[in-house]
Amino acid sequence: MEKMVKKIKEIQMPKEMQERILKNCKKQMEENRMSRTQENKKPMFQRPLVVAASVALCVCVVGVTALAASEKLQGFFKDVKRWDGAVTGTTYENATEEIKVEVAVEGEIIEVSVEAQDPTKAPYGFFDILEIGAYEIVDDQGNAIDVSVEPAPWDAGEATIEILAESLPSGSYTLIISEFVGSAKADQPLPIRGNWACEFEK
């Protein structure tokens, strides 16, 4: 079991995921130690069953984690919880590979083209308005520039969001987006999180 924990630490994965897996394995190891103490009073042929079950559990966890580390991680829904544990909303995490973002400049307008790689996959087929929720535009010196962004219709997995660039002088810039927000009339807005960066000239 200790060797498995060591192997898990060597696999590249999000820190939160690694901590969760290690916590579960360590909890299982502790339960195994307690079980072995209690099983000393029982026939010996029962003990290997407990150990085998825990080993299978950790092997499965390591296998799934290794697969996630070696391939593209997929987006997933995550509950937003209040301090007391009550669920207050939902976000969609790790969407970087699922959304393509391109930037073009038309006069004083920066056009941000957003396209879902698979528009039939949830959540991309369930909202009709898309806006940029969290972003910044930085110049080639790393200075952030204030601009205003307009939401746009989301149709068949695509949208073109306009950023008013009147305040931008001529130069090189990078648009950095960490969150989109998709919404529909009857549903709560859904934050869609990832990391997108596009360079452009004005």
Image (cartoon, rainbow, N blue to C red):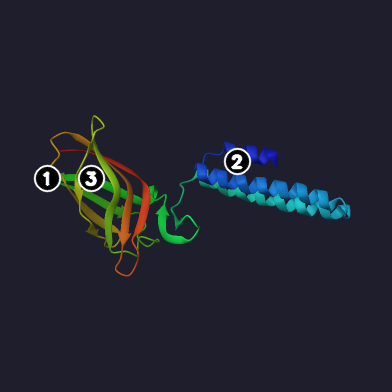
Q: Which residue is mark 2?
A: 8
Which of labels 2 and 3 is toward the front?
2
Q: What is the residue that sits farthest to the bottom in this orientation? A: 186
Q: Position of residue 40 (x, y in %)?
A: 86, 50
User: Is disc 1 placed on a helix, strand or loop?
Assistant: loop
The type of residue carrying mark 2 is Ile
Q: Residues within 10 Å of mark 1 (few under 14, many from 20)?
A: some
Q: Residue at x 71, y 51 (%)?
A: 54
Q: Which residue is mark 1?
A: 108
Q: Quadrant of the C terminus?
A: top left
The type of residue carrying mark 3 is Val
User: In which quarter of the view is residue 177 placed?
Assistant: top left
Q: What is the residue that sits farthest to the front in this orientation? A: 84
Q: Is residue 190 left or right of residue 198?
A: right
Q: Which residue is mark 3?
A: 103
Q: Is residue 87 left or right of residue 153?
A: right
In the image, 2 versus 100, the foreground residue is: 2
User: Is disc 3 placed on a helix, strand or loop?
Assistant: strand
Q: Residue at x 61, y 46 (%)?
A: 23
First in residue order: circle 1 vs circle 2: 2
Q: Position of residue 145 (x, y in %)?
A: 21, 39
Q: Residue at x 55, y 43 (%)?
A: 18
Q: Is residue 89 left or right of residue 165?
A: right
User: In which quarter of the view is residue 66 placed?
Assistant: top right
Q: Position of residue 58 (x, y in %)?
A: 65, 48
Q: Is residue 22 left or right of residue 52?
A: left
Q: Is residue 115 above or below residue 70?
A: below
Q: CA distance from mark 2 to mark 3?
A: 39 Å
Q: Quadrant of the N terminus?
A: top right
The type of residue carrying mark 1 is Glu
Q: CA distance from mark 3 to mark 1?
A: 13 Å
